[in-house]
Amino acid sequence: MNRPYNMKYNFAGRGKSPDLLPMWVADMDFAAPPCVVQAMEEHARLGVYGYAEPDAAFFDTVESWFARRHGWAVSRDGMTLTPGVVTALYVAIRAFTRKGDGVLIQQPVYHPFGFAIHDTRRTPIVNELHYENGAYSINFDDFEEKARRAKLFILCSPHNPVGRVWTRDELTRMGEICLRHNVTIVADEIWQDLVHAPHKNISFATLSPELADITLTTTAPSKTFNLAGFQLAMMITSNEALHRAFKQTFNDSGLFQPSLAGLVSCRAAYTQGEPWLAALLEKLAANVRTLDKFLQKNIPAIKLVQPQGTYMAWLDCHNLCAEKNIAPDDLDAHFTENAKLWLSNGQSFGAGGQGFMRMNLACPTETLAEALRRLEGVI
C-alpha cells in the first residue's frame, strides 16, 4: 500500500532501514471506519475547503458519545477544541504553571509529557510506577510526597505504555492527594475507548464534583478510530475559571479554528462508528492473546505485561538481556538488527522504562504473524 506522508512508514526520514517492520508509533494499520471514509469523500466532492467551525450538531454528537460510552455529562460550554492532545498539554502547562514550577508525571509514560515540561521550562517531578511480578501499581506515599512540590499533575488514563486501566480507588486516592495539596489535574484520556474486558474506563471527572472542579480532561477520537492525521482533540472541564484560563492561553498561542477534516471525521465516527469499534476491540484482544501465547511458548525470556487497555504491548525484556548478555542500552539495536522489528525503545518513556520495548498490536493477522516470525530473531 502506498502511504504518502505517513510517519510510521517514513524509514528514510527517521534514519531506518526499509527492511524493518514498523510497529512503533501509536497509530493503526487498519483503515478508518467506512462511515468516516464516506463522510470524507462526500466533503471532498464539495470542492470547498475553507475555514471550519463546529455547529450545534457536532457538539450534540460529542456530548452524546461521552454520556453513552462513559457516563460522563460533558458540556460544550467547558470544551475547547485543539489540534491534538499534545498541543493541549503544552497549553495547559503554560496556563496553570510558571517557569520552574513542578509538574508531576508517572513514568514510564508517554514521552511528550516530559517534552512538554522541558520545552516550557518547568520542573519534572516523577512518581515512578511500581513494577512487580509483571504488574504495575502506584506508590501512593511517594505520590503524596511529590505532590507537595507540584502545581500540576498530568495523569495518563488508561496508561501508555504500561497498559494499566486505573481503578476507581486508585483514581480517587490520586485525586484526594491533589486536592489536599492544591494541585491542578490534567487527565489525558485519549485511550479511554480502547479498554479490554473485563476492565472498564472511569473518566476522572466523573469521580466527584470536588475532583471534577480541579480537573481538565483531554481526549480525542484519533486513537479510537485511527484519525490522528486529522488533528482534532478536546480539552474539557466543568470549572469555568479553568476553562477560561486554558482558552485564553490557547488563543494567545494563535490557535483558533479547528480542522475541517477533524470535525467531519469525528462526527461521523461518534455517530456511526460503534459497530466498527466493537469489532476492533475483539481483534485487539485476539492479537494480545496470540502474542502472549507465542512468547510463552517460543521466547519465555520476553514477558508480556498484560495490557488492560490501549493497543500497545509492553514487553519486559530483562530476562532476555540477562540470558543474551545484552546491555539495556543496546536493546533497541538488538531488535532492529536481529529481528528486523522497529519498536519503541522503553528508555524513551523515562524512569522505569529501561529493559522494556513497546510494540503496536493494531495490525492485521498477517502483519502480526510476520512480526512473530521476526521476533524469533531476538533469540
Image (tube, rainbow, N blue to C red):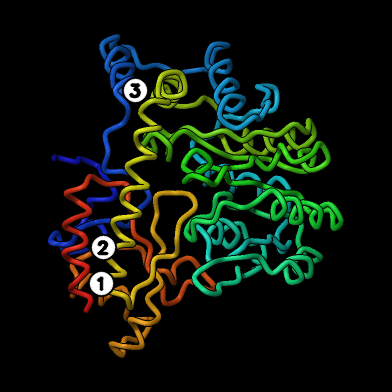
Of labels 2 and 3, earlier in sequence is: 3
Disc 3 element: helix
- Across and down, in percent, residue 143 comes to 73, 66
How would you rate the neighbour count of disc 3 (Cα within 10 Å): few for under 14, some for 14-19, many for 20 or more?
many
Q: From the viewer's perspective, is 105 left or right of 181?
A: left
> Distance between the Cα atoms at labels 1 and 2?
7 Å
For image coordinates 34% across by 33% down, the residue present is 279
Count of labels shown?
3
Looking at the picture, which amino acid does disc 2 mark? Trp
Looking at the picture, which amino acid does disc 1 mark? Phe
The residue closer to the viewer here, 151 or 177, is: 177
Quarter of the image where the C terminus is located: bottom left
Looking at the picture, which amino acid does disc 3 mark? Val
- Across and down, in percent, residue 306 comes to 45, 60
User: For mark 3, what is the residue?
Assistant: 36
Of labels 1 and 3, earlier in sequence is: 3
> Distance between the Cα atoms at labels 2 and 3?
29 Å
Disc 2 element: strand
- Across and down, in percent, residue 173 comes to 76, 56
Q: Do the CB atoms of the residues marked 1 and 2 lie less than 8 Å apart?
A: yes
Disc 1 element: helix
User: For mark 2, what is the residue?
Assistant: 342
* Disc ID at residue 335: 1
Q: Do the CB atoms of the residues marked 2 and 3 lie less than 8 Å apart?
A: no
Q: Is residue 83 above or below residue 52?
A: below
The residue closer to the viewer here, 314 or 255, is: 314
How would you rate the neighbour count of disc 1 (Cα within 10 Å): few for under 14, some for 14-19, many for 20 or more?
many
Quarter of the image where the N terminus is located: top left
